[in-house]
Image (tube, coloured by chain):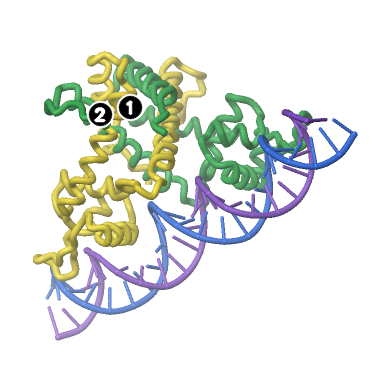
Chain colours: A yellow, B green, C blue, D purple
Amino acid sequence: MTDDHTSGPVPDEITLGRIETEVALLMRFGEATRRASGSAEHRVLDRAAYVILRHLDVAGPQNVSALAAKLNLDGSTVTRQVSAMQRDGLIARTPDPADGRGTVVSPTPAGLQRMAAVRTARTRLYGDILAAWSTDDRDTLAELLHRFNQALESRPRPR
Amino acid sequence: MTDDHTSGPVPDEITLGRIETEVALLMRFGEATRRASGSAEHRVLDRAAYVILRHLDVAGPQNVSALAAKLNLDGSTVTRQVSAMQRDGLIARTPDPADGRGTVVSPTPAGLQRMAAVRTARTRLYGDILAAWSTDDRDTLAELLHRFNQALESRPRPR
DNA sequence: CGGAATTACCTGTACGATACAGCTATCTGT
DNA sequence: ACAGATAGCTGTATCGTACAGGTAATTCCG
């Protein structure tokens, strides 16, 4: 509710509008880039695989449900993606020793290697794109994005 | 291929890695949010309708090809989305007076109204999320995102 | 002017990512 | 030990997208 402010566009709102615009734009860029560069047959890693491997790398091997919860995806989606990744040798599935229902997903060396390659490529791309930026501005961008994501994470309860 | 830097992780690279991480995170948040909030039957605007309306609003009525080029989408994709939007009364198609092959797509008042509603909702959401931020930080975020997008736009020629 | 090449759009088809519903196997609490 | 919850898988549906192919209109060139 928050019986809003029919007071008109306050400066703050202008800034928020700009942020909305830029986030939407960035989103669109990201999708376009992913489609353009990833569709070739030699795609190093498709998108979901990268995110999954990345998460497994930082958070350690875990079962499908945990993965799904963390990635905000349905369990069935993760099941299928993990199956594909197993077929491609990027992850291994082992029965969870602590729970007969569960399957622990862990990255294989090959998976980690490919993930690292993608990460390096992306990092390099950003280096290219931000070539003209000062170290200070880059730092600030990283910091603000981090805080923004934290804010997003702690407050996505519109349900 | 640019056998560069075997020098190890320079501070700059650490920052770039952080940026990569945060952009990826933001992307996932955006997708998750879109799916979660948009799937209900009361979705104000489905799919790419928002982006299309937004673009038509800022860039004026234009034909399908121009739209596709701007949005980095295949013409057929835009055709279908525009058809759906026409069915829903969000845009109107009129024959291009200057080119018998072309169809000019223009937003209807209803379309613009719904677009504005979505934009307002999103802006409010960001206001919520950034409630604890200083005006300065918000400004900086908006500015840096803008510059980042500009850099992305002017340099996506890895093909 | 007239045919060839190009362009704009649409349609058919396919694919990837996702969700939801329903199934089976296993676990947990009383 | 049984009832209910949970983990994962499979079937099916939807959405957004791309590519290939078709038709109509435009433009270019001789």
* Image location of residue A135, percent across then percent down: 23, 16
| Residue at 26 percent of width and 40 percent of height | A118
| Residue B2, numbered circle | 2
Q: Which residue is label 1 attached to?
A: B130
Q: Nearer the viewer, mark 1 or mark 2?
A: 2
Q: Is residue C27 left or right of residue A89?
A: left
* Image location of residue B108, percent across then percent down: 67, 34
Viewer-nearest residue: A127 or B105: A127
Name the chain under label 1: B
> What is the secondary structure assignment of the residue under circle 2?
loop
Marks 1 and 2 sit apart, C-alpha to C-alpha, by 41 Å
Residue A140 visible somewhere in the drawing: yes
| Location of residue A132 by image quarter | top left
| Location of residue B139 by image quarter | top left
Viewer-nearest residue: A10 or A124: A124
Q: Is residue A82 left or right of residue A96?
A: right
* Image location of residue C10, percent across then percent down: 68, 49
Q: From this view, report whether residue A103 is shown above or below residue A32.
A: below
Viewer-nearest residue: B130 or A77: A77
Q: From this view, report whether residue B5 is shown above or below residue A27.
A: above
Name the chain under label 2: B
- Dot 2 surroundings within 10 Å: few (below 14), some, or many (20 or more)? few
| Residue at 15 percent of width and 54 percent of height | A61
